[in-house]
Image (cartoon, rainbow, N blue to C red):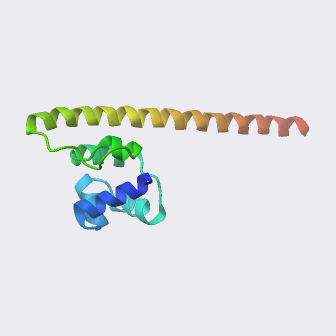
């Protein structure tokens, strides 16, 4: 199941498929959720972080890697707070790694474009 489909599953589970309610629940703009669901746009870090922050029962392994069940076991409140803090930390690290990877890809594209531009200028 793709990340977009997993988010759509959460929208259905928490808010009966109502995108506006889900966006309000996780405190992101309604247009972002709409683009994810209708256009298949990959969610940004803010969406993922807010899902983990505002929906502590969501299993981050399932959300990020499609492993395990969608929801964590029902722990006691103290355990849930500890586990939730761990999830938020892991989510931040995951997002950071993803951004670093994307920045590396962007830098490689910029380097290629600069080389192509330099080659064009030499040909003139």
Q: As displayed, is residue 35 above or below residue 65?
A: below
Q: Where is residue 91 in the image (x, y as percent from the top left)?
A: 34, 37
Between residues 64 and 21, which one lies in front from this camera angle?
64
Q: Position of residue 57 (x, y in %)?
A: 21, 46
Q: Quadrant of residue 59?
A: top left
The answer to whether 111 appears left or right of 54 in the picture is right
Q: As displayed, is residue 53 above or below residue 41?
A: above
The answer to whether 3 appears left or right of 124 in the picture is left
Q: In which quarter of the image is the C terminus?
A: top right
Residue at 14% across / 44% down in the picture? 74
Residue at 19% across / 43% down in the picture? 73
Residue 80 in view in this figure: yes
The answer to whether 44 appears left or right of 56 in the picture is right
Residue at 26% across / 52% down in the picture? 26
Q: Position of residue 104 (x, y in %)?
A: 57, 33
Furthest residue in direction front, as rendered:
68
Q: Where is residue 4 in the image (x, y as percent from the top left)?
A: 42, 56
Residue at 23% across / 60% down in the picture? 14
Q: In which quarter of the image is residue 46?
A: top left
Between residues 78 and 34, which one lies in front from this camera angle?
78
Residue 45 in view in this figure: no
């Amino acid at each position: 199941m793709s990340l977009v489909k997993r988010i759509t599953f959460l929208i259905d589970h928490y808010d009966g498929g109502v995108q506006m309610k889900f966006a309000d629940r996780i405190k992101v703009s309604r247009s972002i959720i709409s683009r994810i669901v209708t256009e298949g746009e990959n969610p940004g870090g803010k969406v993922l972080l807010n899902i983990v922050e505002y929906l502590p029962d969501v299993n981050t392994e399932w959300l990020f890697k499609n492993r395990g069940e969608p929801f964590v076991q029902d722990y006691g409140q103290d355990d849930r707070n500890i586990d939730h803090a761990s999830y938020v930390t892991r989510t931040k690290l995951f997002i950071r790694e993803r951004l670093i990877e994307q920045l590396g890809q962007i830098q490689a594209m910029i380097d290629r474009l600069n080389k192509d531009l330099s080659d064009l200028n030499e040909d003139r």
